[in-house]
Image: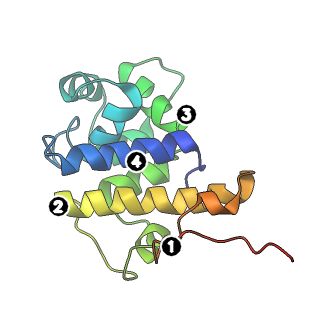
Amino acid sequence: MAKPSTGLVAALREAARRLKNGAHYAWGHHGACNCGHLLQVITRLDEADILAHAHTGMGEWTEIAAESCLVTGAPVSLLLSRLEEAGLTPADIHNIEYLDNKEVLQYLPGGFRWLKRNIRQDVIEYFETFAHLLEEKLLPEMNLPAETFIERKTGNRLQETVPA
């Protein structure tokens, strides 16, 4: 599972927001697929630049992530290193491309179900759920007052009990 960070949470949410707002989406396009959208946010490259870098490697993101050597200095390794710096592992990259991390799927609103890798709305839901899950993992590490958080399932503000 990815290393939780506020940067990764923000990147997942921004990628979901862009997809909701109609950004070009094509699962078979390195710059506009699931990982491509996350890379656009993390690297601030556009889909054409990502496509050009990705074509220096062979295959889909899942294959590139599994076979890439980050020491080579090839442009595609730059993209992969940026994903890893954000907290993702090669397994996470595969899971993002195929929307199949069971821990994320279990955390979906309404419970576990399979999502389709090439359906925009499913990608949005996966990104948002992944962000929520990582945020939940970050909360114990943060030293913030409980009343600043909104309970995920009900939308109610959490209340701290103050002894009388």
Considering only order in the chain, which callout, 2 or 1, is on the residue closer to the N terminus? 2
Contact, mark 2 vs mark 4 (Cβ under 8 Å): no
Along the line of sight, the residue nearer the viewer: 124 or 89: 124
Quarter of the image that includes the C terminus: bottom right
- Structural distance between the alpha carbons of marks 4 and 3: 14 Å
Which residue is drawn at the image coordinates 37% and 66% (left, top)? 100
Q: Nearer the viewer, mark 1 or mark 2?
A: 1
Q: Can you identify the residue that label 2 sits on? A: 119
Considering only order in the chain, which callout, 4 or 2, is on the residue closer to the N terminus? 4
Which residue is drawn at the image coordinates 52% and 63% (left, top)? 133
Along the line of sight, the residue nearer the viewer: 21 or 145: 145
Q: Is residue 118 visible?
A: no
Q: What's under tag 2, amino acid-wise?
A: Ile
- Most distant residue in the top direction: 73
Q: What's under tag 3, amino acid-wise?
A: Glu
- Structural distance between the alpha carbons of marks 3 and 2: 27 Å
Q: Can you identify the residue that label 1 sits on? A: 156
Q: What's under tag 4, amino acid-wise?
A: Leu
Q: Secondary structure at mark 3?
A: helix
Contact, mark 3 vs mark 2 (Cβ under 8 Å): no
Query: Could you say which disc has been placed on residue 85 in the image?
Result: 3
Q: Badge 4: how crowded within 10 Å, few (<14), some, or many (20+)?
A: many
Q: Badge 2: how crowded within 10 Å, few (<14), some, or many (20+)?
A: few
Considering only order in the chain, which callout, 1 or 3, is on the residue closer to the N terminus? 3
Q: Secondary structure at mark 1?
A: loop
- Residue 62 sits above or below residue 46 on the image: below
